[in-house]
Amino acid sequence: DAKTTQPNSMESNEEEPVHLPCNHSTISGTDYIHWYRQLPSQGPEYVIHGLTSNVNNRMASLAIAEDRKSSTLILHRATLRDAAVYYCILTDRFTFGGGTRLMVKP
Amino acid sequence: GAGVSQSPSNKVTEKGKDVELRCDPISGHTALYWYRQSLGQGLEFLIYFQGNSAPDKSGLPSDRFSAERTGGSVSTLTIQRTQQEDSAVYLCASSPHRGQQGNTIYFGEGSWLTVV
């Protein structure tokens, strides 16, 4: 299975941009890159996904490297409500790794 | 509601008892997943159903765990002879046909299982 690697944790200040990296060097040509986040005591929720081109939606932006071996989730202005565990996954089996715990400081 | 529904939301059981956890996927979704999440840990894949195909059971941790999906809709995860290490949140998710990899998956709120 294609796997992803993410930092265990990151910290950000409120109102500042946050760049969450993900490495997926064994990605296959048909794998989509998905990002989910899990707020405390809740199930994961969809954030964004893409295949090759960068993507934007109301929650975030996804920047995908040209070789697709890495991607970055961008939260343009972090809020306290963005504190969560962020998971980067490839859609071969929707296999989740440990994710990145984002802490947002006021 | 229109989301993935799981029941019970909380279950406390005695060690050695059997438990059943239920998942109602979003109507029309053919793919259904079960995950387990222990306290402070990531999501552990358990089993995956896709339409009428044989389920992918490769994540089930032992033969005490089983799952079925009746009529391509509701799924039940059964844990026999529960152990304290089975205590976790059991999350169910569903998505449209897996073949379209751009599809997202939608999670329920989970069933919190405590084995005492």
Image: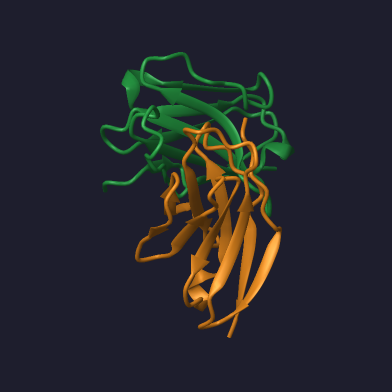
Chain colours: A orange, B green
Relative to residue B41, is residue A52 drawn left or right? left
Residue in the image at 70% along x and 58% along y: A7
The reply to whether residue B114 is in sight is no
Using the rendered view, name the quadrant where residue B101 is placed: top left
Using the rendered view, name the quadrant where residue B89 is placed: top right
Asked if residue A39 is positioned above or below residue A77 in the image, the reply reads above
The reply to whether residue A78 is in sight is yes
Figure quadrant of the N terminus of chain A: top right
Figure quadrant of the C terminus of chain A: bottom right
Residue in the image at 55% along x and 33% along y: A28
Using the rendered view, name the quadrant where residue A13 is placed: bottom right
The percent coordinates of residue B86 (x first, y second) are 67, 37
Relative to residue A2, is residue B23 drawn left or right? left
Relative to residue B56, is residue B16 drawn left or right? right
Q: Which residue of the protein is positioned furthest toward the front in this rendering?
A: A66
Asked if residue B47 is positioned above or below residue A40 in the image, the reply reads above
Residue in the image at 59% along x and 34% along y: B45
Residue in the image at 62% along x and 44% along y: A24
The percent coordinates of residue B109 (x first, y second) are 45, 50
Asked if residue A27 is positioned above or below residue A87 in the image, the reply reads above
The percent coordinates of residue A48 (x first, y second) are 42, 54
**Tally of numbered tags:** 0
Asked if residue B115 is positioned above or below residue B78 in the image, the reply reads below
The percent coordinates of residue A98 (x first, y second) are 66, 49
Q: Which residue of the protein is positioned furthest toward the bottom in this rendering?
A: A106
